[in-house]
Image: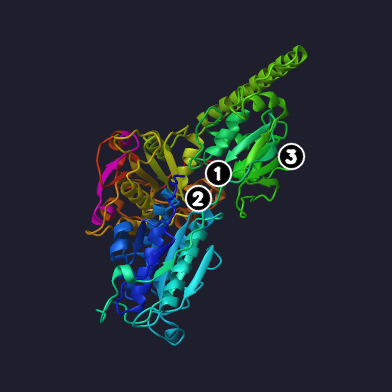
Amino acid sequence: MHETALPAPPSSISTPRLAGSGAVEEAVAIWDALAALGVRDAVLAPGSRSAPLVYGLCEPRPAAEIRSHVRIDERAAAFTALGLSRHDRAHPAVVATTSGTATAHLLAAVMESHHSRVPLLVLTADRPAELRDVGANQTTRQAGMFRSLVRFDADLPAPTATGATPAELRTAVSVAARAFAVATGEHPGPVHLNLGFRDPLVPRAPAADIPAGERERIVLTHRPAPVPPPAHPVPVSARTVVVAGDAGAAARGFAERHHLPLLAEPSSGARGGATLVPGYPALLAEIMADPDHPLRPERAIVFGHPTLSRPVIGQLLGAEDVEVIVVDQHPDWADAARRARLVVPAAAGEDPALADSIRSGAGTGDGAGAGTGAGTGEDEQQDRSENQQDRLEVAARQERLEAWRRAAADRTAQLTAAWQQRAALAVWNATGEDDLLVLGSSSLIRDLEQHAGATAGRIIANRGLAGIDGTLSMAGGIALALRGSGDVPGAGTEAGAAPGRVRVLAGDLTALHDLTGLVIGPHEQTPDLDVIVVDDGGGRIFSGLEHAAAPPELLRRFFTTPHGVDIAGAVTALGAAVQRVDADSLPAALAQSGSGLRAFLVQEGSSSQSSNSAAEVVP
């Protein structure tokens, strides 16, 4: 996760200039407040009731500090905003829509924001109170419509028609500041402001304006960013494994300090290091099926929210003989098997077998340095003995770790190597330390979990709900964020070096589900994005689940759902250049330099038609 420190915002903002429209004046005040607090991007969908937000965003201060993006599809707009927020959560993006059914299309992104804890500011325009529940056009009960999912919601009453009062402006700014603070606070996520707007919805020339220096000031509430929680002790032993969902570097660091097998999902942010066990899903299924297996763990320490593997979620974390400890600072920690004995916000390992190494930092990188005072001969002899014991324990754990890695490699080698897996690996292997890869929720991410090795690139996926909604739009938002911030996707690029590439890897159904994410208007900034679509004619993931035992005709029609769509033609019609490749020619295609929006359609033998594969998938 990329996050920049925010400078302290101003203690107040100026009231907006007179616009002859209370709706426009309130909108200006809201944008001014959000810009001062750190919002840098807003995605808007067209509409009339939301027009004050457009006019407000075009005022000098918001226009100078907030980049505007327009999408005609509200779902694509919401996921674009989610992608913008994912890049730098200290600068959450805004999605804004008109009233009516437009608001309903935001739901999927709000749900993903909630479950993945990504801040998202949702602004929906609404009719004033006198036009609600009386059959007014494009008016529904949208206040509180996301209440079970958002961290905060408010229904702001419409300001006075011809000009917002000081109390109305003060209320709007205060509510916007509270929403921002909650969205980026201790439990980040979506917030919803439903904004009542009364006609006129457009600015009208006022009789006389107040000079900028003489306007009243509005207090701007600022809440400092939360501080990291203190670490709590958790037990560690040689038969402990570390599981990484959306964990970040903490899981990898913990595993390396204690020389423990690391089972890290592709988008965990921890897929690397000396203790990573590539290919763990198939091996873990084998281990957990045998109560006497020599590699069977006695404890699993879970960082983040694992979602991919049934061997992890059901067999390992659901086993009666495995102690489960969850490391998560939020109240909605993941414990699908309901077997977690302990939940801590941050972890410090209690590792008696490596006590001296942990204390001194020798061999494990944990803890502070040892004291420098001279000790007695007896103390020195005891220290040598403890150091020798630690070295023996480290050697034993390294041997156990290598046994994990060898067994996982042997088990992976026995699996069928389908062309779709080779295509996914080609994209994975092309992802360098300065690149960013977005993974769709399809069989491809599971292929990578089983077959991919370590990566130095940044990997992102919508694993909060693991839906296929908005994948291309979200990737486009991330690419726009990188382009706007001047950052490169990875952390390894030196100043002046060329930025890396943003890519999204999706199955055919995932891509078809979000084709409107590729609709970029001629006045809009085009993201620098490679879209790689693996087209095998349907949802291959179901062929690896229990549904594979269904009658073939039922499986094909109702689960794998062949689509019969010319994806290359559809993508071309939406304005992206498309290159047809197969799995073997994909690496060379990805190595080609380019900019803007590019698409690569991967098919078996690079044919225009392909059938769904029933290749083995580790569920």
| Mark 1 crowdedness (10 Å alpha carbons): few <14, some 14-19, many ≥20 | many
In the displayed structure image, the side of residue 456 where residue 362 appears, left or right: right
**Residue type (three-letter) at the residue carrying disc 1:** Gly
Q: Are marks 2 and 3 in contact (CB under 8 Å)?
A: no
**Residue type (three-letter) at the residue carrying disc 2:** Arg
Dot 2 or dot 1, earlier in sequence? 1
Q: Nearer the viewer, residue 157 or 371?
A: 371
* Distance between mark 2 and mark 1 Cα atoms: 9 Å
Dot 2 or dot 3, earlier in sequence? 3
Q: Quadrant of the C terminus?
A: top right
From the top left corner, tell me how far across and down residue 604 is, in percent: 35, 41
The disc at residue 245 is: 1
In the displayed structure image, the side of residue 470 where residue 577 appears, left or right: left
Q: State which region is magenta.
A: 571-587
Note whether 575 is above or below 58 in the view shown: above
**Residue type (three-letter) at the residue carrying disc 3:** Asp
The residue where tag 3 is placed is: 321
Residue 70 shows in this picture: no
Q: Are marks 2 and 1 in contact (CB under 8 Å)?
A: yes
